[in-house]
Image (cartoon, grey):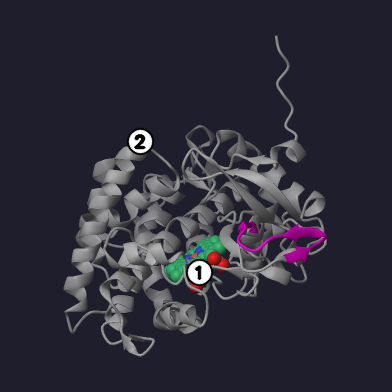
Amino acid sequence: MSKPQSFDPAEYVKRLKVHSPEFAAHHNEVISHIPQHCPVFHAHMESFSPTEIDVAVIGGYEAIMATARDPEILSSQGEPEMFEAAKAGLISLNLPTYVDPPLAFEYRNIVDPFVSPRAAKELEPRVRELVRKLNDRMVEKGSLDIVQDVAQPLTAILTMWVTGLPEEKWFFYSDIIHRMLWRDGDPLAIHAEMEAYRKVLREDIERIRADPNATGVLGATRTAKIQGRPLEHWEAEGMLMLLLLGGVDTTQALTGSATVFLGHNPGHRQQIINNPEILPEAIEEFLRYHAPVLGTSRKLAKDVEVEGVKLKAGEQTLVCWAAANRDPAAFEDPNEVRFDRPSNRHLTFSVGPHRCLGSHVARMEIRVMLEEMFRLYPDFKLVEEGLQFAPDVAIIYGYKAVPLTFPPRKRELPEDPQLEKLLAPMYAKR
Ligand code: HEM
């Protein structure tokens, strides 16, 4: 019998096949290798198409801090043709992702009131009520899937509230996004479905922006000005696409990863049971260790030398947040999950002008889901054979399914027919 081939991260990083099952299996080894051995390096990386591209990878904590905060070093600005295509309706151009400040800040300022710390606080009772209901309908069975029954509907319904899209369309607006980001299915079929999706999104945007009662980000885009002129539909589309891409899978993935970790590490679980007030620190540590977003793409705006490596203007770059989180120069014992870190300045939400706008909302959602988990089924067991990892973790690292069992308990709430109607499209598809 041939011996299984050993995995060599030093060799692997030269040709980063980030979409491969091998990468998913060795993700931890790769991200912890980078900051220690090659905080800045050149590689061939598998792109979204089957071709490989040359990239500069920046994955050391200090290297990122020295570059990613300055758009004059690392720029997000898209090519002019991309803007032409977006204006012509041929593509959705995620905004503000593809623009540098100061324009990026103008788009961010429109979204911010709906995701700020204050907004997260105001949303919390609604989120709590929904999480309670989502759990309550399952507790008599003594089993549920924390990703599919709780995190998936919660994160998508909340994204409808934030964007101002119709709540009843949450499943339509999130289901294909999961499959696209995880490359879960036939790529051509997913592409065709995305085209149809964008058409519906555009129709909804035009209809909602004409409605004086519109709410959320869409409501705000009715009167918002960009560079002193009214915001156009293609820009609203780009902003919404980004919220749909950013708001759903990331938070869902972290919730799944944290639950699997707690299922496999009873000592850590007990620490939270004994001291529930450490949950926020535990969540920060889950965010650091299980960063759902591997990295973000940027372009070098000028020649620079970082950690002795020469980088050239125009080079495509992968700023690897997940790797920086494993940098021993920034975190003691970075490959250990420790809830008592004196400071935990992880880069999971990135750093710089495009830092995640949804971090306050995401933290609140995760906390409420875990608080309800610890209240209702602290003694859960993972159904190991039912755990399903994402088929492709290049963009979002996480689980598709995390089934749990626990001692059944009585329902606390009356059945909610409206919620059942809202959830029906998701359960119909399973
Ligand atoms: C655990 C959950 C989440 C993680 C790990 C995460 C991570 C990230 C990362 C790494 C970026 C890229 C920043 C960059 O390019 O520098 C980003 C951007 C963004 N995220 Fe999140 N995100 C999460 C949840 C959310 C949620 C819940 C929302 C919305 C409700 C959201 C909205 C956004 C937006 C709008 C941007 C674009 C900001 C910009 O380009 O200026 N995110 N996020």
Would you name the residue on which mark 2 appears?
186
Q: Magenta segment: does it hold 319?
A: yes
On residue 77, the disc is 1
- The magenta segment: 304-320
- Which is nearer the N-term, disc 1 or disc 2? 1
The front one of 373 and 146 is 146
At label 1, the amino acid type is: Gln
Residue ID at (63%, 51%): 55
Residue 420, x across and y down, in percent: 23, 55
Where, by quadrant of the figure, is residue 170 drawn?
A: bottom left
On residue 342, the disc is none
Q: Is residue 5 visible?
A: yes
Query: How far is mark 1 from mark 2, CA to CA?
Result: 31 Å
Apparent side of residue 65 relative to residue 136 in the rendered image (left or right): right
At label 2, the amino acid type is: Asp
Element at label 1 = loop
Q: Is residue 401 visible?
A: no
Query: Is the C terminus in the top left, top right, bottom left or bottom right quadrant?
Result: top left
Q: Are marks 1 and 2 in contact (CB under 8 Å)?
A: no
**Assess mark 1: CB under 8 A from ligand 1?**
no
Farthest top residue? 1
Residue 187, x across and y down, in percent: 37, 39
